[in-house]
Amino acid sequence: MTIIDEDILKKIGKKIRECRLKKGLTQRQLADMAKASPSYISKLENGKLDCCIYIIFILAKVFDAKAYDFLK
């Protein structure tokens, strides 16, 4: 059971995927940069996993973005 609404998780995941593809990164490359596993990144992108604020800040740094960009 997820704490966050599934639609919100899917929107966040879609934004992560868009940013990753825009940078030309594979899930494995993003995972390495974020110190996470490729399966974790996959689950985030597919809205199958609650994401913590910590990973949002790490991904924002990787993408030269603001954490807010993933949450708006």
Image (cartoon, rainbow, N blue to C red):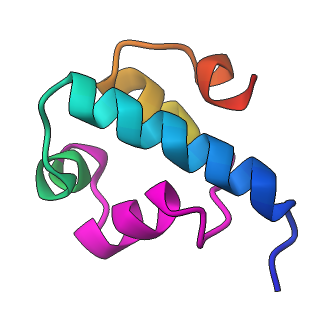
Q: Quadrant of the N terminus?
A: bottom right
Q: Nearer the viewer, residue 61 or 7?
A: 7
- Residue 42 lies in the magenta stretch: yes
Q: Position of residue 45 (x, y in %)?
A: 46, 55
Any part of residue 58 in sight? no
In the image, which residues are magenta?
33-55
Q: Is residue 31 above or below residue 68?
A: below
Image quadrant assignment for residue 23: top left
Residue at image point 27% right, 55% down: 35
In the displayed structure image, the side of residue 54 where residue 6 appears, left or right: right
Residue at image point 77% right, 49% down: 8
Q: Quadrant of the C terminus?
A: top right
Image quadrant assignment for residue 24: top left
Any part of residue 69 in sight? yes
Q: Is residue 68 above or below residue 49?
A: above
- Residue 4 lies in the magenta stretch: no
In the displayed structure image, the side of residue 24 where residue 9 appears, left or right: right
Residue at image point 61% right, 29% down: 70
Image quadrant assignment for residue 68: top right
In the displayed structure image, the side of residue 58 where residue 51 appears, left or right: right
